[in-house]
Image (tube, rainbow, N blue to C red):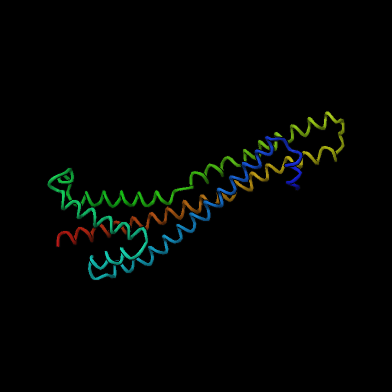
Amino acid sequence: MNLGLVFESGDFVLIGVFLTLVLMSVITWTVIVVRAIKLRAAKKANAQVKDRIWAAKSLDEATQIAQNTDSPMSVMLLDALKASEFYNRNKDTDLSSGVPLSQYLLRQIHHNMAQIMRGFEGGLTALATIGSSAPFIGLFGTVWGIYHALINISQSGQMSIAAVAGPIGEALVATAAGLFVAIPAVLAYNFLVRGNKTLGQDLHAFAHDLHVQVLKNHKE
């Protein structure tokens, strides 16, 4: 499998197919590394700060802990407190006055949670697109390469196995390259979607407890 020969003997279409697959592979592994590191860091930070927040003796102490840590749960806590303060300041002057604090706070917490989860979805569309299209791009390169290989063989008049196997074998490399790009993209997409789902479940459970605690603090 001599890729150099493909670039030497292939036309602009076949070369374009391989360059496209190389670009897709670079994008795939960049998304995999960046998103996997971000997801792992978020889960680790959540696990550390969650216990510290609920072990705090007061909401003020929990707020101090959240301000000194960088995690999705810290962001949710601080945003919930800001929402509660905003409601108290503007409950008689804007539309929030017509909504009970519990509903207003719940809406803000879920909105903030959705914003956080959106930050972990970047690159998933690219992985899904690459995983589904790379095999077909590779197949297109193979069909194109075989077509031109047969045309060149027919023009040269050499119909031996050696004359046919070489050009067609090089064209088939495009299909292998397409699968080589698509398989990691599909596996990474499933892994990251599963990781985001578990992160979302953790944040949802935290949001429920946070909603109760902020309401309790408001009544006190």
Residue 38: x percent and y percent?
A: 45, 57
Residue at the far left in the pictured view: 92
In the rendered view, does 214 fall on the left or right side of 192?
left
Image position of 132 with respect to 29: above or below: above
Q: Observer-nearest residue: 19 or 161?
A: 19
Count of marks placed on residues = 0
Q: Quadrant of the C terminus?
A: bottom left
Residue 36: x percent and y percent?
A: 49, 57
Image position of 164 with respect to 36: above or below: above
Q: Residue at x 81, y 40 (%)?
A: 165
Residue 109: x percent and y percent?
A: 28, 52
| Rendered image quadrant of residue 205 | bottom left
Q: Residue at x 16, y 44 (%)?
A: 94
In the rendered view, does 106 fall on the left or right side of 18?
left
Q: Residue at x 85, y 40 (%)?
A: 162
Image position of 3 with respect to 220: above or below: above
Q: Observer-nearest residue: 89 or 220?
A: 89
Q: Observer-nearest residue: 113 or 31?
A: 31
| Rendered image quadrant of residue 140 | top right
Residue 128: x percent and y percent?
A: 52, 44
Q: Residue at x 65, y 38 (%)?
A: 16
| Rendered image quadrant of residue 145 | top right
